[in-house]
Amino acid sequence: MKQKLTEAELLIAPCGMNCGLCIGYLRDKNKCDGCYTKSEYKPNYCKTCIIKTCEVIKTNVSGFCYDCEKYPCRRLKQLDKRYRNRYHMSMMENLAFIKENGLAEFVKKEQAKWKCPECGTVVSVHRNFCLTCKAELHYED
C-alpha cells in the first residue's frame, strides 16, 4: 500500500523541483498550485513540461527521474544547469537526496534551507529577496 503524501511532499515535481519555492506558488494573485495540479494559472512551460509528461515518469514506482533508464536525460541536464547557475539549486542534487533519504527528509531539509533569515517565511528560489519582508538573500555556492 502506497503511503499518503503530505501537502508539502505533493509539491515536489518529478525533476526534483520543489514547487513550494516557485514564485508562481508563492504569489498571492493567480497562484499556481504546483506540478501535479491542473491550475489555470500554471505557466504554459510547466503545463507542457517534457519531464512532467514523460511516459517513464508516469509508470515508474517512485515517480521521479532517478528511476529512469535515461537518467539524467538531456532535458533534466539543461534544467539542472539553468537552476544551478541562476537560482543556486540543483535538480540532480535534489533527486539524489530524495533517492537516498526519502521524500519526507527532503521536505524537512528544504523547509530549513529556504527560510528567510529575517522573518522566517518561505523564500522563492526565483528571487534574491524575501517576498514578505524584502530582506536580501545571500547564497553560498
Image: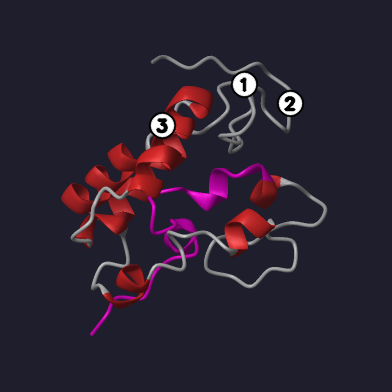
Across and down, in percent, residue 141 comes to 38, 15
Contact between marks 1 and 2 (CB within 8 A): the answer is: yes
Comes first in the chain, label 3 or label 2: 3
Residue that carries the numbered disc 2 in the rendered image:
133
Q: Quadrant of residue 109?
A: top left
Q: Quadrant of residue 81?
A: top left
Across and down, in percent, residue 68 comes to 23, 61
Given this view, does label 3 or label 1 mark the residue nearer the observer?
3
Residue that carries the numbered disc 3 in the rendered image:
81
Residue that carries the numbered disc 1 in the rendered image:
118
Mark 1: give few (<14), some (14-19) or many (20+) Cα within 10 Å.
few
Mark 3: give few (<14), some (14-19) or many (20+) Cα within 10 Å.
some
Mark 2: give few (<14), some (14-19) or many (20+) Cα within 10 Å.
few
Given this view, does label 3 or label 2 mark the residue nearer the observer?
3
Depth check, front residue: 66 or 128? 66
Contact between marks 3 and 1 (CB within 8 A): the answer is: no
Comes first in the chain, label 1 or label 2: 1
| SS for dot 2 | loop
